[in-house]
Amino acid sequence: MRRLVILLALPLALPAQATPPAQQQGQQRQAPQPGQPGRGVLGSVNMTAADSAVKRVVDRLDFTSYKALIKGLTEFGDREQGTPRNAQANDWIEAQLKSWGYTTERVKYDYQGSPREQVFATKIGSTTPGEMYIIGGHMDGRGGGEAANDDASGTALVMEIARILAAPDVTTNRSVRFALWNNEETGLNGARAYVDQRAKLQGIEQPKGSGKYPEPKWLGMIQHDMMLWDHGVPVQWNQTLDADVDIEFQLNSAKADESAQLALKLLNANRFFATDYPAAMSNAMSNTDSGPFQDLVAAVSLRENRRLFETGRGANPHWHRATDLYVSFSDADFRLGFNAMQTTLGAVARLVEARIR
């Protein structure tokens, strides 16, 4: 059996926070406020010029925009695959991406004899367009509610990063692909279809000599699946004071070493660029769209909790339930997802050398 041992510093403790007045579902943790002294995960840190350039990009992320994208997705209900609301949500996602200037594409595949589709867009690298990182979230849901957390929270995260990188004064040396998977809830079918159809196309210039790469070489895949709810086990209505962003890779995979290194880059980016919540890292990634990639390229997922040891054991009472509604989550919950977005963009911006001109 292979072993991978990683020495990590423990996440830094957050200061105690005052408890606000009771709200409808009991006491809620105070949402951290940007700009407050001591709000950062690391506090004051000395950044290199390169880190400062990345921070300028990360600081463009907008909390209100993130919430609005989640809200927009929930207007389609749970977006269950195969339904008109799923198709309408796909169209809405594509329209948003196009409005930011992207050329969109669709992966078409078959699920149990019926056609399915999913949307992606790409920020093309200025100097090395034939290499890319994939940032993903699944747009389908289930449970009869709005699938606000599972997984509008992850889909909106990917879309908000896409919005920031689409700005005309933002450049990246390598490419970044934004993939909004379908059919995650039925067994990762959309992500599997993408891998089956496009893995063999990696790094092929087409037409030859054009400098265009329909499928740049994969350097890493970062998935986002349920980002909002860290309320402990057993569940309480308060967000726990030690709430954090969970970064997972799969130890039992062909690319475990590379995935662990990518997870470490995200962990370190969290400590530089996240404003309110630390991150933790574990090695039992499971049941999400990074799975089909894990034997081919470095693959990690970001979540609110560890999938097997917390979410899978009831840590989120809204999971696949009709109560997975936008109104079920507080600003503190949304800000946890926002910090995951800061973490991902911070890491990816470093990796692709994103800059504001």
Image (tube, rainbow, N blue to C red):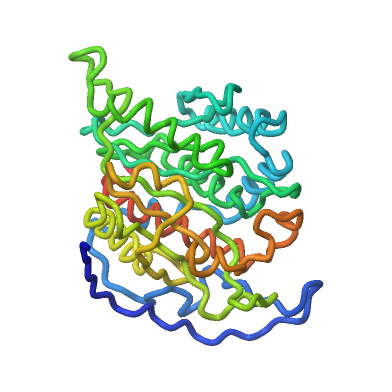
* The C terminus: image quadrant: top left
Q: Quadrant of residue 343?
A: bottom left
The total of numbered circles placed on residues is: 0
Up-down relation of residue 17 to residue 331 (above or below): below
Q: Residue furthest top?
A: 207
Q: Report the residue at 52% width, 49% height from top.
A: 157
| In this picture, residue 296 sits left or right of residue 113 | left
| In this picture, residue 259 sits left or right of residue 62 | left
Up-down relation of residue 350 to residue 197 (above or below): below
Q: Residue furthest left?
A: 209
Measured as percent of width and height from the top left, residue 326 is found at 71, 55
Q: Residue furthest front?
A: 1
Q: Report the residue at 43% width, 72% height from top.
A: 278
Residue 304 in view, yes or no: yes
Up-down relation of residue 189 to residue 152 (above or below): above
Q: Quadrant of residue 316?
A: bottom right
Up-down relation of residue 197 to residue 184 (above or below): above
Task: Please name whichever residue, 190 or 102, is drawn nearer the observer in this view of the structure.
Answer: 190
Q: Quadrant of residue 331?
A: bottom right
Task: Please name whichever residue, 170 or 265, is drawn nearer the observer in this view of the structure.
Answer: 265
| In this picture, residue 39 sits left or right of residue 200 | right
* The N terminus: image quadrant: bottom left
Task: Please name whichever residue, 196 or 340, is drawn nearer the observer in this view of the structure.
Answer: 196
Measured as percent of width and height from the top left, residue 235 is found at 65, 75
Measured as percent of width and height from the top left, residue 281 is found at 37, 67
Q: Report the residue at 65% width, 58% height from top.
A: 319
Q: Report the residue at 61% width, 48% height from top.
A: 152
Residue 355 in view, yes or no: no
Measured as percent of width and height from the top left, residue 228 is found at 58, 61
